[in-house]
Amino acid sequence: MATVICVSNQKGGVGKTTTTVNLAYYLGKDKFRTLIIDFDPQGNATSGLGIGKETLEKTMTDVALGEAGLPEVIIETRYKNLSIAPTLTDLANAELEMANLKNKFVQLKKAINEVANDYDYIIIDCPPSLSLLTVNAMIAADYLLLPVQTEFYALEGVVQLLETMKQIKKTGNPNLKLLGVVATMYDKRTSLSSQVLDEIKKYFKDLTFETTIPRNVRVAEAPSHGAPVGGYDGFSKGARAYKEFAKEVEERTKNG
């Protein structure tokens, strides 16, 4: 059975999709069969892997509405052991329609159950909001991964997200665990980044990943080339950091 990780932070611009894509890429490189579910209507994980949206016949919109199964949507990428269930912006409209469905909170969980034996890891990229899509992802997941940028207001909204997680553990998914917090956009040259990292470690303690993701131009450039940073410049600081981060994720999930 796949280990299912939802990557979420209701604050935008924290490196959520970048973390999803690059974590999945390195898990694939490490010989784990990995699937990204792009459950963010912006569809950045889809375009960030070079998937031509104009070519898509079925997407996560169809899955969310129960009009297609996940196997019908999944596309193999050009990267080893890495597939994606892509999305388009119409997923935002589908969310409104989902609200009328009888099983609106478990649509994604039901879909994942169809393919859970085909993968080692399933990584869900959530929208930057506490929406019905995010709730679906949390109910479907084994773990929540929280990227937090080392900038002002880093922990803004995090408390509310953790409160939502607590409610979901009570009512929808008692097995959901916080996998950890990864500090992104870290710049060791600034005292602000160091102060915020200290604050994150103080708040989350052992749940903070050792690896920090640096602010790196190669990480920022890679999506415009339809590639994870490891596929764009595998020797860059950002690529090396995500490679180490993936190892940590493997270790934490292996130990449950």
Image: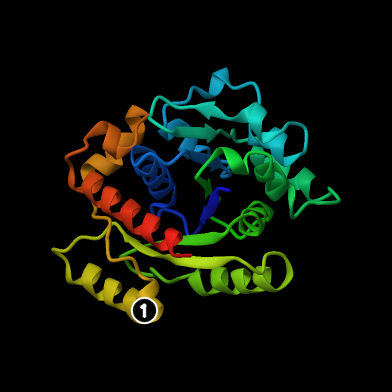
Residue depicted at 84% across the width and 49% down the height: 100
Which residue is situated farthest in the bottom direction here? 202
SS for dot 1: helix
Name the foreground residue: 155 vs 33: 33
- In the drawing, does residue 140 fall left or right of residue 8? right
Residue depicted at 34% across the width and 32% down the height: 227
Measured as percent of width and height from the top left, residue 178 is found at 50, 68
Query: Dot 1: few (<14), some (14–19), or many (≥20) neighbours within 10 Å?
Result: few
Name the foreground residue: 66 vs 53: 66
Under mark 1, the amino acid is Lys
Measured as percent of width and height from the top left, residue 42 is found at 53, 40
Measured as percent of width and height from the top left, residue 189 is found at 13, 63
Residue 54 sits in quarter: top right
Residue 25 sits in quarter: top left
Residue depicted at 29% across the width and 38% down the height: 229
Does the rendering let one see residue 10?
no
Residue where numbered disc 1 is placed: 205
